[in-house]
Image (tube, coloured by chain):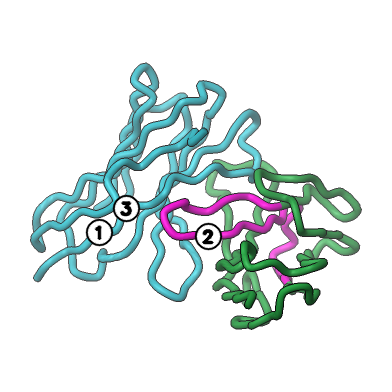
Chain colours: A cyan, B green
Amino acid sequence: DQQVKQNSPSLSVQEGRISILNCDYTNSMFDYFLWYKKYPAEGPTFLISISSIKDKNEDGRFTVFLNKSAKHLSLHIVPSQPGDSAVYFCAASGASNTGKLIFGQGTTLQVKP
Amino acid sequence: NAGVTQTPKFQVLKTGQSMTLQCAQDMNHEYMSWYRQDPGMGLRLIHYSVGAGITDQGEVPNGYNVSRSTTEDFPLRLLSAAPSQTSVYFCASSYSLLGSGNTIYFGEGSWLTVV
């Protein structure tokens, strides 16, 4: 039972355009969501997060949107750069925002110059 | 600042052998955890600890043991390695409550192959 799903295994966009990565979840008890970026042979690195009391959080080129009624979140990267090419994981945390994360399968983003 | 340090980076084991993956963090985080990453499945939680002397199971705990004798260290033991344990293992640490700038930090990973 996959509680956090990233249904697109891969995404390819042109440099300078917008990248939109999507994530769906099934457990209504999740109240904190994070996006991680992972390069090959490295550990995941934190990108941006959002609490369930918000519907948007922005940090530079990265914006995360949360639609609680649809149990859906998305990560927007504008403008996309070749260095953004990586695997992006969406993750969710349950009650009390503990460090116990449930991850999606990941989406591989390729940004073409 | 070393962050989260895992050793070894690469290991090949024979079926039935035992080994320990080491993890240390220098950020005084209460929370430490171990994940495994398999193709197409994202990261799955194996075991976690909310503080020294306290451990609990995650999604996929079978075949693994952990202990937390100090705040800094959280080793993962494979008691009798099986080919199904071939994976990339990540150790992570954080303050117990996420948000307000707190997040989870991951080590660089340990590649384990069981033949």
Residue A78: horizontal and vertical position, in percent?
17, 52
Q: Chain letter of disc 2?
A: B
Circle 3 — which element? strand
Quadrant the C terminus of chain B occupies: bottom right
Q: Which labelled disc corresponds to residue A107?
A: 3
Q: Is residue B112 left or right of residue A38?
A: right
Q: Nearer the viewer, mark 2 or mark 1?
A: 2
How far apart marks 2 and 1 lie (CA) works out to: 18 Å
Q: Residue at point 64% right, 75% down?
A: B114
How far apart marks 3 and 1 lie (CA) works out to: 6 Å
Q: Chain letter of disc 3?
A: A
Residue B91: horizontal and vertical position, in percent?
64, 63
Residue position for label 2: B37
Q: Chain letter of disc 1?
A: A
Q: Residue at point 32% right, 53% down?
A: A107
B109 and A75: which one is in front?
A: B109
